[in-house]
Amino acid sequence: MSFSFRQARYFIAAAELGQVSHAAVELNVSQSAVTAAIKQLEDLLGTRLLFRHASGVSLTRDGARFLQQARAITAAVAEAMRVSGDTVPVEGRVRVGVTYTIAGYFLPQYLARFQRAYPQVTVELHEAHRTAIEDGLVRDDLDLAVMLTSNLENTDQIRAETLFRSARHLWLPADHPLQKAERVSLADVAREPYIMLTVDEAAFTARRYWDRTPHQPRIIFQTSSVEAVRSMVAAGMGVTILSDMVYRPWSLEGQRIDKRALAEDVPTMNAGLAWKRDLVMSPAVRAFRDHLGLAFDLPIGGLDRR
């Protein structure tokens, strides 16, 4: 059995969406096709990549490692297949707004690839809060933004394109009693001490899905530090619900952190690109936008290039 690009794409979709059925809809294929491709991939690699449970799928430790490799593979294949009519090297400047989470947990590997592919393009990164980034795009102080598109507010003046969706799971210490529960609901979580992350409007986003239930988290501490949340959860001080994009199975102290799917349909954290709707993209800006789009297998040719 040989490795295929299709297997990597199907695995990435299932891992990011947390549901094989959702991945099938996203890919416009049958659910059985996604299941079969992932099973073939696991057989080929000789390890389990996804845990299957009643509420969906979640990454194993090997799966989390392979997800990064799979993204790099699909990006390289998409880039190799790109057909460009440009005969002159692209050069210029791209002013890119980024939020904290994107800068720390998403952008570096894709930015490094872009800089290798376009050495004559200067990328200026500006880390800021979402509202400042939206203002910067509207005022033409920024060309593009790589941000959490699920938080975007000014959709009248700003166009956004989601690159990927990161499922949210419950984080808990390895020996927590909820590890043994057949299913875990938000009602179960509400009975536990809760560590609330506040950076990039995480607390505001969390309250949106908590407010749809009769329950509220029992917050004992709020922090803008993902590492503080990780350490506190690992030490048994509380639990939290965060996205797979920022999940790591170990704290800085070397203590284990596990995650579990929730019974409720908790929304994903969506990351992607944003730009002013009437922006006329320079070749450098368009190259940056297309480079990230290719990394996630988006239909570049059909995009509005304005």
Image: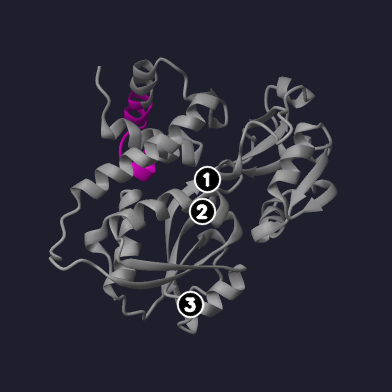
What residue range appears in magenta? 24-37
The correct choice, above or below, for 289 with respect to 41 in the image is below
Circle 1 packing at 10 Å, graded few (<14), some (14-19), many (20+), is many
User: From where the camera sits, is residue 274 visible?
Assistant: yes
Q: Amino acid at mark 1?
A: Ser
Judge left or right: residue 267 versus residue 111.
right
In the image, 31 versus 246, the foreground residue is 246
Asked if the residues shown at circle 2 and circle 1 are in contact, with their CB atoms under 8 angstroms apart, the answer is yes
Q: Earlier in the sequence, mark 3 or mark 2?
A: 3
Q: Earlier in the sequence, mark 2 or mark 1?
A: 1
Q: Are marks 3 and 2 in contact (CB under 8 Å)?
A: no
Q: Is residue 100 rendered to the left or right of residue 38?
A: right
Identify the disc placed on residue 166.
Answer: 1
- In the picture, which quadrant includes the C terminus? bottom left
Instruction: Give the vertical position of 76 relative to 144 (above or below).
Output: above
Residue type highlighted by circle 3: Leu
| Front residue of 164 and 68 | 68
